[in-house]
Amino acid sequence: MTEDAVDLDAKFDLFAEPWSPKLVARLNDYEVKLVRIKGDFVWHTHDETDELFLVLDGLLTIQLRDRDVVLGPGQLFVVPQGVEHCPRADAEVKALLLEPAGVVNTGNAGGDLTSVVEQI
């Protein structure tokens, strides 16, 4: 990774596909990822870790089995380890994710939306 400042807007300009997180920095054993979100994801859990969502642009709903958490720009939510969740957005959302290296975006669910994280 680089020792230069990371321009998040410039990094978002490098990709357009939703649900395909891109690695932009590392923090110890954690990865900082950018993701475009649009539509419905899959219900899943991460049994080994929490997952942080920070919305940079747009309106993101993180569906939990007992409630919905709605986030706008500048808001974050940590999905606790083992909690089933399903992110969704009617219009495109730009978000930053912080999670341990190697976390699979679809957690225990797998499927077509499983993504290999690329560094940009």
Image (tube, helix red, strand yellow):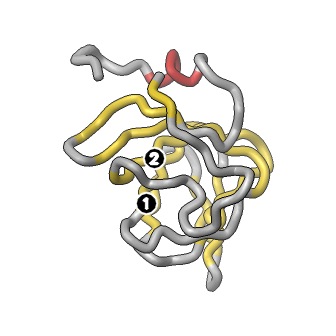
Could you tell me which secondary element the residue under label 2 belongs to?
strand
Q: Quadrant of residue 84?
A: bottom right
Percent x, y for residue 2?
27, 18
Q: Which residue is mark 2?
A: 97
Percent x, y for residue 31?
35, 42
Q: Which residue is mark 1?
A: 51
Residue 4 lies, with reference to residue 59, above or below; the image says above
Percent x, y for residue 81?
41, 73
Quick one: 73 or 20, which is closer to the camera? 20
Residue name at image x 37 percent, y 70 percent:
48
Mark 1–mark 2 CB contact (< 8 Å) = yes
Residue 70 in the figure: left or right of residue 27: right
If the image is split into quadrants, where does the N terminus sit? top left
Quick one: 107 or 78, which is closer to the camera? 107
Q: Quadrant of residue 57?
A: top right
Percent x, y for residue 80?
42, 72
Q: Amino acid at mark 2?
A: Leu
